[in-house]
Image: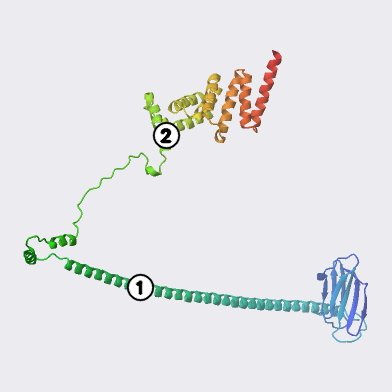
């Protein structure tokens, strides 16, 4: 059952009715209020307020304000008149039910009309937006077409201008060719005239002239003039011999570095002599097995797998092939340390340090390893002073290496302990 809200106050003017409905402690939303021309309802379950108004009102312009736990209604009358009461008096239940149903029905119809109006408005807006978009697209298309047309006209003008220039150049070339042809013809004619002037006379004319010039003390000017006017004889054919400087490298001698090339050739020859000197037992090996770098990589792999003796044998062969690679001695020293061949480890580390000269930044890492491995071998032989010297040398090269620093501290403690015992 609903709880009816009976407390309200109202006042009126000839044109409006002002209704105040207290709703203490209730949460009111706009959806809780329903109003038509002659029916007013406030539903806040389980509370309900309902009023069949005395006369019709303008529900479109009427307002309801919610605040301070009060709903204040401003209801504008359709006809200006004073009401005898707020609600319709002496109304039976059937009439009230009919008015309520009519109010609900009108509200549904009004909502339906508003929905239809909104749909129509929305469609009009869509239509307007579509028309505006089409106009914009048409304007943009027209602008692009104008740009294309202008570009086409520009290209056409440029093409016509280029054709005119090509025609003008062709005419100039043709004119030059004609002039050149004329010059060649003129030169040919001049040459013919010159040849006609210097042509040798016939035998009869020469005999006649010779007869007329014979006599005591006479001489022939014709023969001398003929020698001067005659063209030179053609050159004799000959063969020119060209000798090239023998070169090992494909570059020209003027572009090569002779000293560096000779040094490279000397090293290659020395390497070939080393390989073929006393390694007759290596004839059965493959070509890559005779490469010291390949052997070094193979020895590294064997060291990683724990085959230290096999790695030492591989490094021995690589050293026989090339005894100038410090990494071979350095890696073999690591194998000797694992095999407890301490004296050999010291010997290989020392040889690696000899080859790692001069000391440069590129071989810092290798020198550090050589000092550490030799120092480790010295310490395992209980030669702590020599081992400490090698560790300190490694620290000078790599002062930020914490592991080497800690090992050096341990060696110092061992030296101090040995001194105290003695």
Residue 186 badge: none
Q: Is the C terminus in the top left, top right, bottom left or bottom right quadrant?
A: top right
Q: Is residue 297 left or right of residue 69?
A: left
* Relative image position of residue 344 (x, y in whole percent): 53, 20
Q: Identify the residue at horizontal 63%, vertical 26% (top origin).
A: 392
* Relative image position of residue 266 (x, y in whole percent): 40, 32
Q: Is residue 341 left or right of residue 205?
A: right
Quadrant in which residue 112 is drawn: bottom right
Residue 18, compared with residue 264, is above or below; it is below
Q: Mark 2 highlights which residue?
A: 263
Residue 52 in view of the camera: no
Q: Is residue 188 left or right of residue 219?
A: right
Q: Identify the residue at horizontal 33%, vertical 41% (top origin).
A: 245
* Relative image position of residue 331 (x, y in whole percent): 52, 28
Viewer-side residue, 95 vs 68: 68
Q: Identify the residue at horizontal 59%, vertical 20% (top origin).
A: 378
Quadrant in which residue 221 is drawn: bottom left
Label 2 crowd bin: few (<14), some (14–19), many (20+), radius 10 Å: few
Viewer-side residue, 396 vs 192: 192
Viewer-side residue, 409 vs 324: 324
* Relative image position of residue 152 (x, y in whole percent): 47, 75
Q: Identify the residue at horizontal 48%, vertical 75% (top origin).
A: 154
Which numbered disc, 2 or 1, marks the residue that appears first in the sequence? Answer: 1
Quadrant in which residue 116 is drawn: bottom right
Q: Is residue 363 left or right of residue 41?
A: left
Q: Secondary structure at mark 1?
A: helix
Viewer-side residue, 387 vs 117: 387
Label 1 crowd bin: few (<14), some (14–19), many (20+), radius 10 Å: few
Q: Mark 1 highlights which residue?
A: 172
Q: Is the N terminus in the top left, top right, bottom left or bottom right quadrant?
A: bottom right
Residue at the outermost front position: 216
């Amino acid at each position: 059952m609903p709880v009816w809200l009976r407390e309200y106050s109202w006042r009126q003017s000839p044109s409006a009715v002002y209704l105040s409905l207290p709703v203490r402690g209730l949460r009111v939303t706009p959806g809780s209020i329903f109003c038509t021309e002659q029916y007013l309802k406030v539903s806040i379950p389980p509370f309900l307020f309902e009023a069949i108004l005395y006369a019709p009102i303008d529900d479109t312009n009427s307002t309801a304000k919610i605040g301070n736990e009060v709903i204040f209604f401003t209801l504008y009358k359709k006809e200006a008149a004073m009401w005898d009461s707020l609600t319709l008096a002496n109304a039976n239940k059937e009439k009230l039910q009919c008015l309520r149903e009519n109010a609900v029905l009108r509200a549904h119809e009004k909502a339906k009309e508003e929905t239809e109006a909104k749909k129509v408005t929305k469609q009009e807006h869509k239509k307007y937006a579509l028309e505006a978009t089409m106009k914009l697209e048409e304007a943009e298309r027209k602008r692009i077409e104008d740009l294309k047309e202008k570009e086409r006209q520009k290209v056409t003008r440029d093409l016509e201008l280029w054709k005119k220039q090509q025609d003008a150049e062709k005419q100039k070339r043709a004119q030059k060719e004609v002039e050149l042809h004329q010059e060649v013809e003129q030169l040919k004619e001049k040459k013919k005239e010159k040849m006609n002037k210097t042509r040798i006379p016939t035998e009869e004319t020469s005999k006649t002239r010779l007869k007329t010039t014979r006599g005591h003390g006479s001489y022939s000017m014709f023969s001398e003039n003929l020698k001067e006017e005659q063209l030179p004889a053609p050159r004799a054919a000959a063969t020119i011999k060209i000798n090239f400087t023998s070169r090992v490298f494909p570059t020209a001698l003027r572009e090569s570095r002779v000293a560096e090339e000779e040094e490279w050739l000397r090293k290659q020859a020395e390497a070939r002599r080393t390989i073929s000197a006393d390694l007759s037992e290596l004839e059965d090996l493959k070509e890559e097995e005779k490469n010291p770098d390949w052997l070094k990589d193979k020895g590294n792999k064997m060291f990683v797998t724990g085959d230290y003796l096999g790695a030492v044998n591989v490094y021995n062969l690589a050293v026989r092939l090339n005894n100038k690679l410090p990494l071979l001695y350095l890696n073999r020293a690591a194998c000797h340390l694992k095999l407890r061949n301490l004296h050999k480890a010291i010997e290989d580390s020392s040889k690696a340090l000899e080859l790692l000269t001069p000391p440069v930044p590129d071989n810092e890492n290798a020198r550090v390893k050589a000092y550490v491995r030799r120092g480790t071998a010295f310490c395992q032989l209980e030669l702590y002073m020599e081992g400490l010297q090698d560790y300190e040398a490694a620290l000078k090269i790599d002062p930020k290496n914490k592991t080497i620093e800690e090992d050096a501290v341990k060696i110092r403690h061992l030296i101090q302990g040995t001194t105290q015992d003695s």
